[in-house]
Image: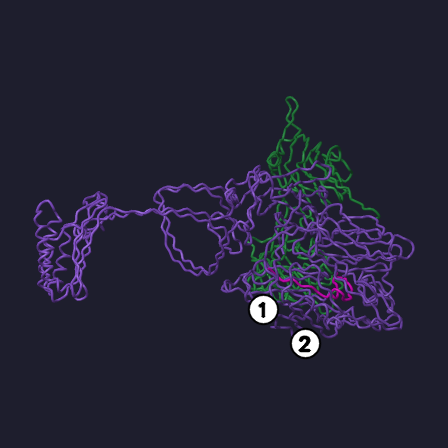
Chain colours: A purple, B green
Amino acid sequence: MFRSNLFPLRTTVGSAIAITEVRVVGKSPEAEDLDPVIELRTQLDEIIEDPMYAQLLPSTIRVGSTDYHPISDVATMPKPVDLPFAPAPFVSLFALGHGTAPDDEIARRVWYEFELQLDQENNDPVGGICYGGYPFLPYYVTSGGENSANFGLPREFQLLWGSDSTDDFVDSQHMLTNEEPTSHSGTHLLCTGPICTQRLRLRISHLPRLAMGVSSNQIDERWGFAIPYLFVFKYCEGTRYRARVPGGVLCALQVPSGPADPYLPLPLHLSLHPSPAPADSVDLSSVCCDAIVRDTSTHQFVHLSAASLFGQRRPIAFGGSETFVLKVRNNEQVRLFIEQAEENNRSIAGLRFRYPGGASSLGKRFRVEVYEVDPPEGVSPISTDPDWKKSKYLLRLFDGETTIPATEPWKLCFVRGSLARYFLVVFTYLDHDSGVLAIEDLQITQSTRVIVAPRPSRTQTLKTMHFRVMGQELASDYARIGGGDFSLSIEHWVGGQRKDALFSATSLLDLLRLGSARLYSNHRTWGIETETALTEKGSYSVQDSLGRTDGWQRTEAGDDLPNPFPLPDPSSDSDPMMSLAQPDSRGFTTLGWQESRNHTENIAPGSDNFGPDAQELQDLLKPFGFPTLFSPPLALYAIHPDVGLQSGDDAWWAPWGKNAPTDAFKDRLNVTGVNHANIPPYYIYAWKQLQKMGQDFTAWLQDPNKNPSLFDDFVQDYLQWYFQMGPFFLVGGMSIGANIGGSVGVSGGLSCSASIGIPSFLQSSATGSSGSIALQASQTGYSYAQHVNAGFSSGRSRTDFQEGLMIRKVKRDPDYDVGERRLGAEVAWQGQPVDIVTGSIQLGAQLPATASNIYKTSDERIEVRFGGAIGASLAVDVWFEVIEELVKDDY
Amino acid sequence: MIIDESSLSGLAAYLTDEHSNTNLASSITARWPPFGQQVGEGKLADIRGLSLHLQVSDIESLWGLPSSSPSPPWLLSLRIVKEMFPGLYADPYANRVHFIGGFEDFRRGVAENLQVLEVDGIATLVSSDEGDCSWTSAMYKMPDPVRLNAAAWDMASARLAPPDSYHYSLSLETWQGTDPLDGPPSGTTSLTVASSSTPAGTVPGARPDHPRLNQNAFALDNVVAYRVKMTARVRAEAYVREQYSEGNAAALLGFPLIRAITLLEPVAPAHDFYSLHEVTLASNEYKLFDNQDNPPVRFTANLNVAATLTKDEYMELQINVPDMQTIEARLEATLKVRPPVIDRGE
């Protein structure tokens, strides 16, 4: 696919999307009688064992005249080591067709089409599919550079998807086709870019030829395919920056001879080399050099595949895990064609080998060459050409010798970084005795830098380099880039010349120095702030409150209880108020003192309010013949100014406001004497006399000096009345008298009493004052109280501010889990707030294709260096606008 | 590796005749690099101009077109032979290119078992699945009759592609002279060379590793219209990763085949000079030198010619100046050399 950009750091692979259903929706006529095996899986462990593996592998290997059978561990599938996401429900697809002759093209014509139903709850865009083949199939390489078994993978994948929003268009992009004659043994990514769909259609075609074995100089091949795992993943743009680069083996060949016990002893007349050979001779120069290890006692064998180099190692019953092991002789070569496997090519700095350290390979010397393979269009990266070293599409990256170390991994660093997709690693055995090449692990290692250098088949014109730096703390300090020690420099190197430092930045300010740089930053406030707020008049608050309490409470006080507050250290700067939390010299005790004073003012009865009571008494006595006793009644008059019945604003009830008593009410505040009357019904006449005596006595009492004769009249009448009524009162018992006394004021009384049945009358009054003083003191040395409380309260309060000042500390933390964002200046990336700096640098460099006839130099490169680490807190991406021109003069 | 650049100087900068003479007064043809030599692999000559020095007794007569029609009619003819298309060497200043390619040309033709798809950013005829396929272009009518004598075509795959991955043939169907354009073509010229290993029953023609040009094997005059026809049989897959619309994806993909067909029509060379006046028009600078009281006999000019010559390319000067005492042609050029890198043990 034509690309005008290089993305050495970018990835678009997100998390996996569950596949919920898979069904066959079409197949070619050649496959009409064969349904594929579809296994929906939920755990990655489920792919380890499957009965299909044993059917895909040769069931018998003949060495001499003895047949050997594989041990059970051979037909297993280790979990892939380079899955870029956590597994979600996925699918395994298999098919094993009929036999096919070498020149039969049925395998090319067969195709299947599947429909993949994705998780309905997924709303994220789909980014593509991730799949892998079965890496342990024997194969040979055709003259066209095809891996015959292709690790079980079809050579053509078509991915189709629908979209409701674009169905009405006739030229919308709905299909991605990937066709390659040779696939690698690792994990494949087929990236579509962001597409919104919940259903995919997958069409696979051009199936590989699976070698079941060789018998009678005939190779037994069947068409079929094996995809033990196929995931669908989300589109999620990110940066990939770590040492290990996923990869896979395209093929492994050993020349000029092959392993002593080959896995696939291909008859030479079936191979594609033109040299004539006897029909029973075996040619292994184009056959996988995987060897087998035999157990002659059990007639079982183990297959040691080159595909295990990238981490998918099967357990071996003979001990340990699978390791690529080959017997070699002097000057024999082992060629490994490998491929980096991510969706964008990474800058590769070298390789890392780990040897098993066995005695047979320890100390053996090998020449190791590594080439960048950059074939032109339509050409396989695998070549079995004897003159392969003369190919213009190879570029040597390393040439050196190594002696197999005991335990330490061997790191191989290229002469320069390479963005190539394919590499050729050649081991040439240098010792003269027979030896063993044993490699346990091979790792393609990413460069810490991004390096764009000339490649063999394409002239590259680098127009512009873009960069993007993202991090949550990126814009927190302009003196740094992110929170760490990150720096960025871009250099143009040309052999023999001083490098041209195009740009370098060690701080955010440096990055923004570029005219094209843009900073997208979130606003920042200090996490803890001192806030001073002046509340002005007019502010108010309305508060509703509801409260309910249920509980119990216990209080205990006493000197012997433990003190929860330690004594403050006088030398410290502790809060001085803490001293109040300490008991004083009195200890924990309750002290009380109380003084109560009472003062009583006695008021003489007034003449004007005595009337109603007298009238009532008169009315009461009237039925019994009593005469009118008091007329007119006595009025009340003030005795003390403080209780005077003043009127006006300064009256003592003025604070009552509009509820002040009316004048009528004021007049009701009377002090009256208390009258008591007891009247017998048969003394009406006598009572009239007594009434006259009372009137005289009362008149005299009110003003003794005015009518002194009244008292004489009273005495005369009394004596007369006494002798007339005496016999009656003596029977019932009666006394009548008057008294006059005084202390501070004057008091007097008239009394008349008789026995039961004889009316009696009593009126009493007092003037002057009396008082009392009570002093009270208490001390509680210990108290204990325990309460059970239940309560409910409801209230509303309103506070009106006249003026106020509040000083407070405020801490503000966004709650990302809630996800509620305030509208405003905010920059987010994939749901997280980050700061982003982007920029562009004009390059204008032309990197010639080394396969062209003439060019200035191949020792030229653009190099982006990253000082410090790119970590989880800082994502850095650089990409190049490039024009590639294929070198067509390949003849 | 440090690459040296140097100005072409000394005698090596002069065009020479087949006897290595730098004075071309008695010569008909001169070349750079000299006859029998090549620019060579790893070398590049970046030519900025050509300095001419002429000494002619009657230089006045050369200023205008000759009254008669000499043969050849020009005074000087400069040929720059470059690799215009892979393997096809011709003078780009003396040939007009007919280009047939792109989505519109391909879609206006009639295709069978072929799709027009974008492959690596270029419109390409791609076989649908395997088997036979064909494509016939629209008929292109020329405003004036033309002569066609060379053809080259661009295939999507390199020549290193598997030889048996596909076989194909290209032919040019022409209407010439007064042929009725609504009738069948009067001539069919095969552009591809038949393969000796063409499988029986397959389309005869070329394989991926065969040359993709036809030069000097045909010459069609008075062509008033033409069309191109391609047939192919595909037996393999190529490396293709493309995103297509659903309408184009009815069938499986086979092999990306042809991207363009170019036909060469010879035209009047841009560097044929019929008089000194034309030379001065094409020069940055010119001078006439004379002796006292005598007409000028020497003429120098810096001819404005730019060319980059690499392997197997050359510049040729043909001379037809009467009564000439001296003519020298010197290149103003920079020579770039990239010594081949030989790795250890190769």
Q: Is-magenta flag for residue A145? A: yes
Q: Determine if residue B87 is in view.
A: no
Quadrant including the N terminus of chain B: top right
Which residue is labeled 2 in the image?
A: A34
Q: Amino acid at mark 1?
A: Gln
Which range is magenta?
A: A127-149
User: How far across and how far down the image is residue A878, in percent?
Assistant: 62, 47
Which residue is labeled 1 in the image?
A: A117
The picture quadrant where one finds residue B162 is bottom right
Left or right? Give the position of A826 relative to B86. left
The picture quadrant where one finds residue A427 is bottom right
Q: Amino acid at mark 2?
A: Leu
Left or right? Give the position of B132 relative to A744. right
User: How far across and how far down the image is residue A254, in percent?
Assistant: 83, 59
Most foreground residue, A764 or A503: A764
Q: SS of the residue at dot 1?
A: strand
To which chain does the residue with label 1 belong?
A
Left or right? Give the position of A693 relative to A105. left
Most foreground residue, A592 or A802: A592
Cα distance, mark 1 to mark 2? 22 Å
Query: Which residue is farthest bottom?
Result: A33
